[in-house]
Image (cartoon, coloured by chain):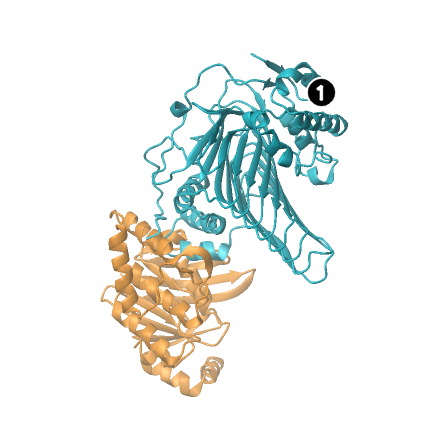
Chain colours: A cyan, B orange
Amino acid sequence: MKAASLVPQKDQLADLFDKFKTEICINDSPYVSNLRFAALNSFSVNGFPTQTAEEWRSTSLIDSLAPEYNFYFEPSEEKIDVDKIFRCEISNFETLLFTQLNGWYVYKQYPLTEFHNGVIVGSMAHAFKIHPEIISRHYGKIAHIDNNGLTALNTAFAQDGIFIYIPDNITVEKPVQMVNIVNTGENLFIQPRNLIILGKNAKLTLVYCDDSIKHQKSFINACSEVFLDENACLDYYKLQNKDNLSTVITNSFFNLEKNSRLNTNTLTLNGGVMRNETYVSLKGTGAEAKIYGLYLVDREQHVDNQVYADHIAPETTSFEQFKGIIDDNASAVFNGHIHVCRDAQKTEAYQSNKNILLTDTAHVSSKPFLEIYADDVKCSHGATVGQLDPEALFYLKSRGICDRNARMLLMYAFAGEIVNKINIGVLRERLDAMIIKRLKGELSICDQCVLHCKENDMIKFEIDMSKV
Amino acid sequence: MPLLEIKNLKVSINNKKIIKGLDLCVNEGEIHAIMGPNGTGKSTLASVIAGRDYFEVNEGEVLYKGKDLLSVPVETRSREGIFLGFQYPVEIPGVSMTNFMKTAVDEHRKYKGLPSLTAVEFLKLMDEKKKMVEIQSNLTNRSVNEGFSGGEKKRNEIFQMAMLEPTLAILDETDSGLDIDALKIVANGVNKLKRPDNAFIVITHYQRLLDYIIPDFVHVLFEGRIVKSGGKELALELESKGYDWIKEELENK
């Protein structure tokens, strides 16, 4: 078993790379190897981000990086039947389901599934080996490593993840669901790397779930590059339901060509330290990005969303809306940055971040930010931080509704605005139920994927939310 | 035993005395109208009964069905049959009327030891009550009061009252801002809901409403006290003469 255990630090990681170079680079083309070395150099200079950097001011990785973690350089030989630890129980939610276990793509027969219409879905490790020409056209092209230590580290060490290739004019009818499970008896540091490519007029719905099953410390440093060619259309739902010992960092880079449409929704239900960086590059005229997010945090949890929308071409549109409910001693950060280049005339960019603090010790830091160099644009931004409206609470209670349910109705209504933007009905309903459970503080008892909750009889909510 | 008995009630907000020794007795089957100039404590009285907590009760007691009401939580008061029709109903975006009313009705039923209504039963009930208060629009998918016109909001209050069938309903200027048709609908709602075992307190500025809701008693609230009580003819007298003669009467005492 090729593995090592260490406290992740800059120099130790460089040594680790040297020691396991053969394993790490086993599937590399020279192009990918060169990228790795460049990334490792960049990481050796920058290291892990610290709070001295402006964009990391409110999020600290010190505690997350303190313990010793295990690094695996090949998949576990132990045969785990993924179906046993995890089962899809959503009826009518038919997806093309793919799984990663502890950072490695799990497959029964084929590491890469190639469909008759040219669609390829499967293991990134095998894509490195089998499709070097696609890799060299897209891989590492938009995930910038210069100012981003974690993306650099991921690029240096990345071995596996999900690879999706949709050729021109192909619509994938069923949603593709990627479940990333951590299930280990030991501390684990994993760095999934995903590459998603949509050709011209291609269409895809992707549901990406981060879950953990056993309670051990894990550090996930994931990086995704997503390409939308002309007229392509992607719905990308990201669900994060990790245990409180998890650190999850995701860096997602989107490249939007002419008239392509991106709809992304990041729903953070549970986790220890979570940071999602989303970079959307609106490169082609008429491209449109909807970037939504919801975070529900309590206890000592911390969530940080960084969104960078770069309007490069004219007539591009971005809608950004993030909402959060912060309870107990939890904290949340939102940094939204809209950048409109000089040539990006007729840009429309809207940004909104709304937060509810449920306690005096909950904390939020919100920074909506516009940087505009064009003169014919429509842009707006705004942030609010508040409590549940006491007038609304009184109104509900004056009709006989108890304090708990009155709060629940208001929180659910607040969160509902983001959940309602999910286009898959079954997924939306299921998430509705999960959010109610989360708001009731019942979700942490089942640290299962939001879509694969093992309880058959869901706890009945006093409030019947069924859309009668 | 009176349904509601208020004895020498004194209430202040931020040390400012609003209600200064108020007595009121409401029996089952009665309709009481409370009138009076602005700023005399009418809405405060309604709020005290409904259970708002931003003021201080300095003295006196409020008994409901013979028991102390002031120590009872808001939601329990509602389940015990008290209903406040708000002067300014609150807009609650994202909370649908259906979820709101279903939750409220279920909590009332639970309190009484009754099982929850099924979705079908509930919708039937909603339809029935909607007809009663002549609401045509589809409430189910609308958020509570959001985007409702002034008249719709007030009608929605009466609708909620019809759903919860209170024993004691206080309507706080439900007629203000209503055109004559809406006023009739609101009044009709009250008349249909009136039973020998419940009571209404109607707070209003205008005698107009009392053409449609015939009160058994009319009280004049002035400077935090009920200074005059009478039958429905008192309202007519107030309408034609204003409040000055009452002030004079008080000064001459």
Q: State whether residue B126 appears in this view.
A: yes
Question: Which residue is located at x 39 percent, y 48 percent?
Answer: A402
In the picture provided, is A324 more to the left or to the right than A36?
left
In the picture provided, is B72 more to the left or to the right than B19?
left
The quarter holding residue A198 reads: top right
Q: Residue lying furthest left in this view?
A: B196
Q: Residue lying furthest right in this view?
A: A45
Q: State whether residue A301 appears in this view.
A: no
Question: Which residue is located at x 58 percent, y 40 percent?
Answer: A226
Residue A241 x %, y %: 49, 34
In the foreground, A439 or A78: A78
Q: How many marks?
A: 1
Up the image or down, A61 lies above or below B176; here it is above
Up the image or down, A252 lies above or below A320; here it is above
Residue A209 x %, y %: 49, 35
In the foreground, A327 or A16: A16
Residue A351 x %, y %: 61, 53
Q: Residue lying furthest top in this view?
A: A1
In the foreground, A452 or A296: A452
Secondary element under disc 1, as helix, strand or loop, is helix
Residue B140 x %, y %: 35, 59
Q: Residue lying furthest bottom in this view?
A: B240
Up the image or down, B111 lies above or below A444; here it is below
**Tag 1: amino acid:** Ala
Q: Which residue is mark 1?
A: A14
Q: Quadrant of the N terminus of chain A?
A: top right
In the foreground, A323 or A173: A173
Give the chain of mark 1: A
Q: Classify mark 1: residues with Cα within 10 Å, few (<14), some (14-19) or many (20+).
A: some
Question: Which residue is located at x 36 percent, y 43 percent?
Answer: A461
